[in-house]
Amino acid sequence: MDTSREFLLSCDASQVQLAPEKFAEICRKFTELMVAKGRARIAIAPLRSAVQRSRPSPNALTPAHPLLLQCCLLGKFYSLAEDHLYPQGTMRAQFKCLDVVDPKTTGLVVKDFFLYCYYGGMTLVGLKRYSEALDFFLRAFAVPATQVSAIVVASYKKYLLVSLLLHGQGETPPSLYLSIYLCLCMGGCVHRERLTSFFFIPF
């Protein structure tokens, strides 16, 4: 673990970008071990370094991003996590997420994007910025897919609960995402739908 930590803090950016998939796996295993040992806070600095060294461009999303967000959440460092949610030089109000570039250059997989959206939404909930949190959760279940993952289901549940906090009722997603919405309802979110219906407040 100490070897991995030192490697993430001092590795050469040009070298790790030649093998992005292997570097991503090192980051995942390191985070998994640190979280299991209750040392998520100690993993933050190495993962920040991993983000900086593995991204091919300043606003590119990497596999290290969701891992960093996870550790910041566990350590309750919401403001630190916020620094890695949006592209540099953009206004928060634009709600623009980081760029998904060619996975061959970053080692990014679909699960990484789902986790970035989920942990990003949870970070913004922690900061009580509910409108932005809704946008992140929505991105997670807006990705076209033939199967619904557990992360997408969790994002949808959080979307319902945060919309309840923000608007007084659980909002149905935009019609653009209707097919995914129906899959989620059939995939185990029906009870959460019923729960939010009890809190409907007519205006």
Image (tube, helix red, strand yellow):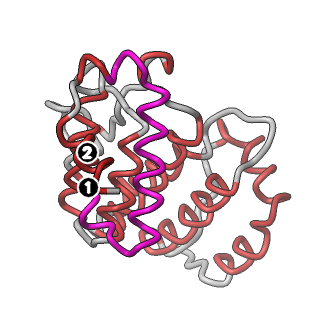
Mark identifier at residue 84: 2
Residue type marked 1: Ala
Q: Does the magenta portion include 30?
A: yes
Q: Residue at x 54, y 61 (%)?
A: 159
Dots 2, 1 in contact, CB < 8 A: yes
Percent of width and height locating residue 34: 38, 64
Q: Which element carries disc 1, helix, strand or loop? A: helix
> Circle 1 is placed at which residue position?
81
Relative to residue 160, is residue 122 drawn left or right?
left
Circle 1 crowding by C-alpha within 10 Å: few under 14, some 14–19, many from 20: many
Q: With respect to residue 75, does 13 lie above or below?
A: above
Find residue 116 and report its horizontal and vertical position in percent: 44, 46
- Amino acid carrying label 2: it is His
Query: Which corner quadrant of the image does residue 2 belong to?
Result: bottom left
The x and y percentages for residue 1 are 35, 56
Q: Is residue 47 magenta?
A: no
Which element carries disc 2, helix, strand or loop? Answer: loop
Residue depicted at 19% across the width and 53% down the height? 45
Give the residue drawn at x 33%, y 61%. Answer: 124
The stretch in magenta equals: 16-43
